[in-house]
Structure formats: C-alpha cells, structure tokens
Amino acid sequence: MSDREVIRLELTRHPWLPNLGNIDEMLASIGVSSVEDLFRDVPPAVRFRGGFHIGRPMSEEEIVERLDNLEEKNSKLTCPPFLGAGACPHYVPQAVRFITSRSEFYTAYTPYQPEISQGLLQAMFEYQSYMAELLEMEVVNSSLYDWGSALSEAVLLSHRLTSKKKILVPSSINPFHLQVMRTWTAGKGMEVREVPYDSRGNLSQDHLERELQGGDVAAVYAQQPNFFGVIEEELEFLTESARKHGAISIMGVNPLVLGVLRPPGDYGFDVAVGDGQELGLQLNYGGPMIGLFATRWDGRLVRQMPGRIVGLTTDSKGRDSYTLVLQTREQFTRREKATSNITTNEALMALASLVYLSLLGREGLRELGEEIMRRSHYTSNRFEEIGVIRPLEGEFFEEFLVRFPLSYGVVRKKLKERRFHGGFQIGEREALFCVTEAHSKAHIDSMIETVAEAM
Amino acid sequence: MWGQASWDEPLLFDYKGKRRVGILIPKEELNAQTHLPEKARRKGGPDLPELSELEVVRHFLRLSQMSYGVDLGMVPLGSCTMKYNPKVQEVSSKVTEELHPLQDEDTVQGALEMLYQMQSWLAEITGMDQCSLQVPAGSAGELAGVLMTRKYHEDRDHHRTEMLVADSAHGTNPASAAMAGFKVIYVRTDPEGLVDLRLLKEVVGSDTAGFMLTNPSTLGLFEENIEEIASTIHSVDGILYYDGANLNGIVGIARPGDMGFDVVHLNLHKTFAVPHGGGGPGAGAVCAKGKMVDYLPGPLVGQVDGKYSWSIMPKRSIGRIATFHGNVGNVVRSYTYLLGLGSEGTAMLGVMSTIATNYLISKLRGVRGLELPYSSRPRKHEVVYTVSPALKEVGLTAEDVAKALLDRGFYAPTIYFPPIVPEALMIEVTETESKESIDQFAVALREVMEEAYSNINSVKESPKRTAASRLDYVKANHPSTFTPSYRVKKMREEGKLSPLR
C-alpha cells in the first residue's frame, strides 16, 4: 500500500499550513521514509479511510461571500429586538472593539507565564477591581462562562461548605439560569425549592423564613432585578435569615443596575453572581457572555472560589506585578479535589467589560442607568395608554412584564411584519419586554403604534 | 535582540482626572417618571475613575504591549494547541453578533444554518452520530459528558460510583468526574507510556461508570490498545469518554467514534482555531454515539425542507449546560476556519501537526540535560521532555527553562505537566508554525540548556527582557498580603482589613 492511498496529501499549498512544501525534508530530518511511519502505532482497524464533506478549501473572498450569504438569511430588524430574559441589546463603542481586537490580547493564552503577560494580568486585575467596586465585594474571579454556570458554581460552593442539599430560589428566577443550575448540580443531588413572590413581584419574606426553619438549607438565592424585571425592594432580611440558619446567601445581579441600585456587598451577601454581557458585549446569539463571581472577604468562601484569580505582588526588583493566585484551588494541581473543573474562562469578554466601564466611569454608569430607566418607563407608559397593562406593580429597570388584551402571538406577528422583534413570550397574553439605550424614541413610538394596530 | 515593552503604566484607579467621560450617553427628550424604591437605591455611586477616551485607549494599548500572543511569536504550550487564528475569522462575527438568543427561529436562519453545518461537520470529523454545541468550553463539555454517563446508568438502575481516569490525564478529567459526584480511580501508565491494560482490567468492575481518556495522551502517544480498552470498558456496560483536547494530532487519521468512544468533547479553541482570548472565551462541542445521543445537552438544531430550528431535544437530555446556545460567536469562527481548510485541509491537520512535533524532536536530539521519556514511540500533537538530568547535574528546573525561553522571545511550554514526568516540558508547536520557526525554537531551547551547563546563575536570573522579572508568590498568596482587587489594597492601606481567615 503506498502512502498516498492511506494518507491523502492532495493539498500542496495553503496559507494556514506552511509546511506542505517541506514534508520530505522534515521527514528526512525525523529519519522516517514516509508519513505512514509516524502513524505506525495506529491500528489499521481504527484508521479513517473516508473523506470529509466540508467542501474544497475556500479563498478568503469566497469565505466572506459565504458569511455575507448567511448574514442575509438572518432577518434585518428595524432596531434591536425588545428581548431580554438574560441578554439585552446595548451599543458597543468602537474603543471596546478596538482594544479587544489587539492580537497581544486576543491570541494570548491564560497567563501562566506572568513575567511576559503583565499587561493582560493587570487588565484582569482591573476587571476584578472594577467589579469589586460595583459589587462592594472584595474578591472577584477573572470570569466564569455565564450567569447560569456562575450560579451553579455558587450552589456547589454552598454544598461544599455546608454539606446540605436544599437550595432556595425565588420563583421569579430566570428559568434558563435555573435549568443550568439543575443540570450542573445533578451529580450532588441538590434539592431546589421555589419561594413565591407577592403582587408587586417581590420575594415573599414569610415563605423564605418558613423554608429556612428546618436548618437544612445550603444556600438562599435572590435575583436583582428578578426575571420579570422587578426590582427587589427588600433583601436585607434575606442575608440576615440566611446567616441565622447557617445558609450561604447568594445574590444574582445584573451589574449594569449597580450605578443606581444597592450592591450585594451592602446587603451583606456571601456570594454574588451575574453576567457582564450588558457591559460592553454584543448579543452574539447568547454567547460568549461573562460569568460574574464574587465573594466577601472571608477565607472560608475565598478558598472555595472557582476559577482564576489575579493578584497583586512584586517582582524581584520590587516593582508592582500581577500573577494568578490561589492556584492550589484549581484542577491542574488539585484534580478531583479542585473547587471546579473550569479552565478556559471568558477573559477577553471580561476585558471588553472593563474597557466599557472605564469609558463610562462613575457618572457615566449612573447616567446610562437613568437613561435606560427613562426609556423603559416611557415605553411602559405608552403601552398603558393603548391598554397594555403591567400585571406586576413593582418598580423595574429595563425589563417589564406586560399583559395584552389579546393573544401575544397576534401582536408578535404584526410586529415582525414591520421588522420589529417583540419581547419574550411568558404566557398566552403576556410578554417580557426589554428597552435600553439601544432603542431610540422613534423606534419605541413606532413599535407601540404597530402594537396598537394589531389590537 | 528581543525585548518586551515595559511601560510603568498605573492602574486606572490611580489616574487623577475628574469629570471626564469616554462615551457620550445618548439622551432622548422623554417625559417619563421613574421612582427607585428608597430601600434599593444606591447611596454613593461606585468609586470608578472618570477617564477620557484617549486615556482609556492609551492605557490598554500599553497593557497590550506587555502581553504576548500567537501573533507575536510561538506559544508552544502543550495540550493547548495554540495555532494561528486566521484573520478572516474576525469578519465572521457579523453572522451572530446582533442576534438575540431568544429571537424567533425564522429570523435567525443564517446562524442556525451555520450551527447545523457545524453539528454535522464535527460529527463527521469525530465519527460520532450527533453533536451539541451548547458547551462553552472543554471543561463544560467534560461535565456534560460525565453527567450523561451518570444519567445513562441511572436509567438502567446501575449503581456506578467510580470514574476511571488515566494518571496522565488533564486535571479537568478528575475535577469534572468529582463535580458529577463520582469517585475517581486512577489508571496507571505502563513503562511504554500507555494505559496499563492489565491494571485497567483489574480495576474495571461493577462499580465502573466509565473511563475518561485522551488519545493521543498528554505524552503525545497514541493508545495503540484502544480497541481492547474500549471492549474492556464496554464489557461492563461502561462509557468510554474522549477528552478532545488532543484531537489535533489525529484529525483525518483516526476518529474517536471508530475507536469505540461513546462520548467526545471538543475544544474548538484548540483544534478548530478559535482564538484563546487571554484565557477565553473558547467554544466547545459534546458529541455522542449510539445510545448516548439521547443524553446530549439540548436542544440541537434540526432541518426540515431547508428550514432550520431548535427542533431536536434528545429524549433523555441532561438538560441545559449553558444559559443559552453556547459560545455561538466563537463557533462561527471555527466554521470560518473549516471553510478555509475545506475537506482536504482538515484531513491534513493530524499529519501536519504530527510532522511538526516529530521534526522538533529531531532537532533536539543530543541536547545535554534534556531527556525524552518513552523514546521509542512516535509522538503526535505534542511531546513531553524532562530536564531531570540537568536538575541533578546543575540544578536547572523546568521553570528555569521556561523563563529563559521568554528571554529569547518565545512563550514557554507547559511545565510540570503531566505529573507522571518530573521536571516536565510539554511542547506543542502545531501545524501552523513554519519549519524555520520550529528550527528557531529548537535553537533557543538548545541554547538555554547549554547556558545552564556553562552559567546556571544567568539562567536562574531570567527573565530579564520581559516587563517583569520573577515574582514573589509568597506575597501574592499570603493571607496578610493577598490582594485580588484595588478595593482590598485600599482597605488594607486604610487599616480596614484583617488578614484573610
């Protein structure tokens, strides 16, 4: 059997395979006569003799044409969708794109060699520091995958610390986060109990207190704002009750609201989780996102933290320097005793969030929060004018639940005819709408008029 | 001579400006009242610096110059597959970046078509029946795989408590198995560097849930007894799991599905060229064969009459592993990469990466102090050396070698891994490095080893040409000096923070 029958060497030149023209001399240096010799340890029965069906190699022009073609198959919308439920549309400044396109950042690996990676490490330290300020919590890791996985990790942490299995979550939790948490914790047999909400949409204190009585709760979770967009008005009782009953308190929070709303550290939460997507990231059809994870200054919690943490130290010349710290928690040293299996995280997205936040600054973040609230409330008022009500009275940030007098399916269809994408359907006549600074007044007005026509 | 930029760049928090902003917030004239509940209102905003756009850009550009990626030079990190990321990939984000994950399927047909094609291409490349792209990276793929294994056994009323893991495995394997509630049993490597078959047969039994294996192994060796390993695991109805971190060495040569693997995870940021982003985001896939398809995380993209939708929900799915559909914005980068390689280029990955590894080995023959364990077997995607001889003779450690390579303008290999090789240098050059660039790396490594024997102190002082010299890890990790944020630094300076307890 000749080489060419076994191993196909049909390609002679390719921009990403520089050594196609050097095969013979490289084999000579290795000291084998054919490529086949390098695979003599692969049993014949498992050798792949078929071909792939990807097509012939495309030139860059052809690739771009194919991508354009795919892009055209997506609907062109008049303005970003009025969808939230875990990811919200925002404008991403050019400076963010520019910085995250720097090759030194985006083609780097996790900074295992700190001396040559100080810039990246400083940026990660700054990301942790910005989030620490927003959250008023001391220790932030340099990102997990997304909110759902961050919540899962927090629950697993609470299980390791308390050896208990019951988790209390509000029934106003984002259902996608809940599904992820159920999947991730299935191996530990965690039992999830839902705590109902009142007519305003706020977490029921009485129910929570009752559930905690048994003393068998590992963690209590609150989400701010909750899935229906409602701002939880009272959360202090939650951290107090959790502490009293030996449970870990976890706050899920959209960090964008923290320019105007009280941070988890101020309430005394043990752990904060969330997603940084709303701070400088595109929607990306739902990923990559940024799993946010923070704890307060307590060694018990910090030593159980999942993920990479960057810390400040000095080098041998006494200069401030940065490095990965507390690595004995991680999988490559601790293996089955590690605090998590996570390795690859969302560092570049964390960098994007950091750049975005550094452009906004303190007042910019507050102003942005206020502008978003003005637009969402304007939209809600316009809905009310045409007879679309808010079934939950509680105050909201950018998302709010609305009830239509007719099937939402009809409204949704009408909106789509005008190239608007309506909110996320919750029930037959209810939907969750999200309005941000990415929705102009003209678009909001036009969307409302379209809804009115459908009615 | 190479030297890294060394800006004395302050933290953003140490910038002094006030009343500056880097983005103008758009303001609409709207008549709308908002009433934040008093108890939930933030008192005193977060203490963030206020900077101009130029200050921000300059700060980060300076930081970028103190960082190192594949576009600057070789990153020969073993098991990380740091191949070149073709620039056309960056155009591909247009297919996904403006799409919301909950949009109606008829409005995202382009993205779904791309995902559907990726599902089927990756299934073909791995020899599996079906792939889910919901896993955001390799570890999440592993977790999905072990949870699938767990549910498979639960469905059959099997009581399986043990997950077998090779002692040469990536640390993520035992960590994932433990997260899914399994007890980890290590299977030792035999004197040839392969899974010890005799031992495997001894430990496999009625408690065995499955075996997590990477092939080629972290030593870069192909497990030639793979068929017997598979039949041993299958003889007790165990699940054979493929850690795809090392797939690059055999793409086009052999497929996990044909070797008897039941579940596979892929790291698209390794084999399929998603840029690593300084630690992430990556993208992943978890693929299954036969009876295991029913357990995949879902939903998956299906196609009927040219219309794509999330129509396939595996019957016994473990559920959702990511909040939405995984890192789709990166899956499209891999898709772009595969378009450029085509069938023929893709089929060459295993050959070309294996040639690169063995070529490097040929260039490192006879280097004093550098020893190649299990030297009789050809390597695939990577090779592991030990500098144990040099440690005994002149006190050179693997870490010293790493630091000295930095001074020569290269990133360092993975060091001290796998743990079964002392003073290990784990090197993966990948097929995208030219022959000359491999030559240069070999020369650099040879020089480092020679310098160790002529002037060990000089090696111990490296790196000297990077932005920082060797760091104080005791200070970095000590409870009274541990500083993971500016907030901690400030509070400690103000005497408001006790040591971490």
Image (cartoon, coloured by chain):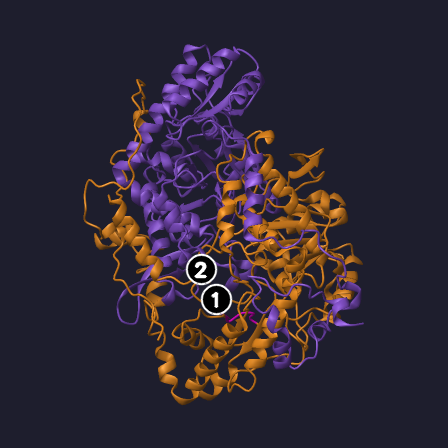
Chain colours: A purple, B orange
Q: Is residue A162 visible?
A: no
Specify start and end residues of the magenta stretch as a single range: B414-419
Q: Can residue A36 be seen in this view?
A: yes
Label for residue B75? 1
Is A282 above or below relative to B484? above
Compared across the picture, whether A149 is left or right of B46 comes to: right
- Report how far apart the C-alphas of labels 1 and 2 lie in the structure: 8 Å
Question: Which amino acid is tagged 2?
Answer: Ala
Question: Which amino acid is tagged 1?
Answer: Val
**Residue B32: x and y, percent?**
32, 18
Magenta segment, prevailing SS (helix, strand or loop): loop
Identify the residue at image location x=68%, y=80%. Answer: A32
Mark 2 element type? loop
The N terminus of chain B appears in which quarter of the rendering?
bottom left
| Image mark 2: chain | A
User: Are discs 1 and 2 both within one chain?
Assistant: no
Q: Mark 2 points at which residue?
A: A108
Mark 1 element type? loop
Compared across the picture, whether B370 is left or right of A271 comes to: right
**Residue B61: x and y, percent?**
32, 55
Compared across the picture, whether A287 is left or right of A385 comes to: right
| Image mark 1: chain | B
Q: Do the residues labelled 1 and 2 touch (CB within 8 Å)?
A: yes
Is A6 above or below relative to B63? below
